[in-house]
Amino acid sequence: MQPKLQTVSAIPSPAELLSRADALIPILRDRAEECERRATVPAETIRAFQDAGFFRILQPARYGGYEYWLPAFYEVVIRLARGCPSSAWVLSVLGIHNWEAGLIDPRVAEALWKDDPDVRFSSSYAPFGKATRVAGGYRLEGRWPWSSGCDHATWVILGADAEMENGELNRVAIVLPREDYEIDESSWNSAGMAGTGSKDIVVRGAFVPAHQLHNIQLSITMEEPGKKAFTADTYKVSFGVGFAYALATVALGIAEAALAEFIPYIRKRTSAYFPGAEFRQDPIVQKALAEAHTVIDGARLKYERDFREMADYIARGETIPVERRVFYKWNTAAVAKASRDAINLLLPSCGGSAFNTKNPMQRYFRDVNCVANHLYLSFDKGAVNFGMHLLTGGNADVLV
């Protein structure tokens, strides 16, 4: 069976993709409670994302993708977070994997999409499992938590420490098909990002060919094998930075959504204790709004500046240097923290009604705090690494 490749004329522009995202916002908002209640993104939402072309934004063109610059994808995710942060998160994680497939051995992309360009894969990158070197590959076993969107994927990529041919132990991520793993259906119970269905993946001694791994160590030197086969500019960004921004921009989207919700809400709100008093006239509320606005604005400017600078390096034919990637990776943590801080500034002015389950502010609050707590976006660890780099030139983060 031949892959269902799209022609160039069928590829939507970035502006059209944003228009499609905007049209889905009210639909996602209507489904948000159901998404959280079921602890997974509804299948109808995943189909809508697929029909809109969102999963193909970063996918290699050889397999029906658009190969767009990373922010074209992030901006879609940011818009969708206004409707349902959990759904936006799942799109972001599954969609960024299609970009990652352009970095690793091209045989992986062929296995994924040779028959169906709409195949998706979920992940869990922390090295919870054991990869034992055997003839021709690895024997993988273990349990990996937090595989967001695994209900809607037929492959998975899992973290491990694996012995290379030269005897070195490297951090890797190993790709395997659905028949080689199980999903623990009872393993996801979370107050934040409740609808992401980030369940545990269980592998019981699966054999994986040696080429079906992403050697994370190679991302430091930007020498992953896929870069020779897939040469679009989007694949010239380092894995660590591209993936981290896929998470951080969800937080930014939630913060921008909260700001957009807050302003009209406060304009209409009056005090029950002081009849006729308008919250929009309260200096404390005004101060909180101004602070939150500038924090969110600063986060967006960081993100946009980083990708402009990366684009400049690539346009000059230069590899993005490690010292700048350390800075960009630190900025992903700063963007996530700023997004959380902004919502935490706004919430007190919303009163107790903000925690009504029908009020999206309570969902934004829970979800942004959950995202900012992701280890990959750890502000403290990121600060230590960046500060160390400024003072010594060192770097302890393999994922930059």
Image: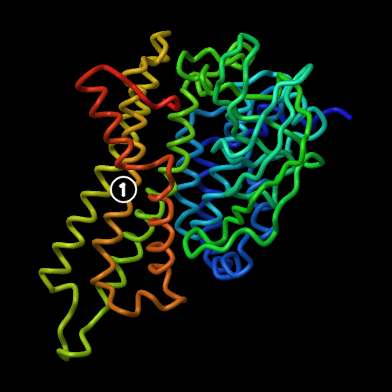
Query: Considering depth in this image, is 72 or 346 the residue closer to the camera?
Result: 346
Quarter of image, res 286: bottom left
Q: Is residue 400 left or right of residue 13?
A: left
Foreground of the two, 32 or 182 = 182
Horizontal and vertical percent for residue 51? 68, 47
Q: Position of residue 362 (x, y in %)?
A: 40, 69
Residue 130, compared with residue 194, is above or below; it is above
Residue depicted at x 15% and y 84% = 277
- Relative image position of residue 310 (x, y in whole percent): 38, 22
Task: Determine which residue is flagged by label 1.
Answer: 337
**Residue at left offset 76%, top offset 22%:** 209
Q: Nearer the viewer, residue 194 or 284?
A: 194
Q: Residues within 10 Å of mark 1 (few under 14, many from 20)?
A: many
Say above or below: 19 vs 282: above
Where disc 1 sits, the SS reads helix
122 over 8 or under it: above or below: below
**Residue visible at 31% across and 79% down?**
352
Residue 397: image quadrant is top left
Q: In the rendered view of the protein, which quadrant contains the N terminus?
A: top right
Q: Residue at x 64, y 67 (%)?
A: 38
Relative placement, left or right, of 388 versus 30 is: left
Which part of the image, by quadrant, shows the C terminus?
A: top left
User: How many numbered tags mark residues here?
Assistant: 1
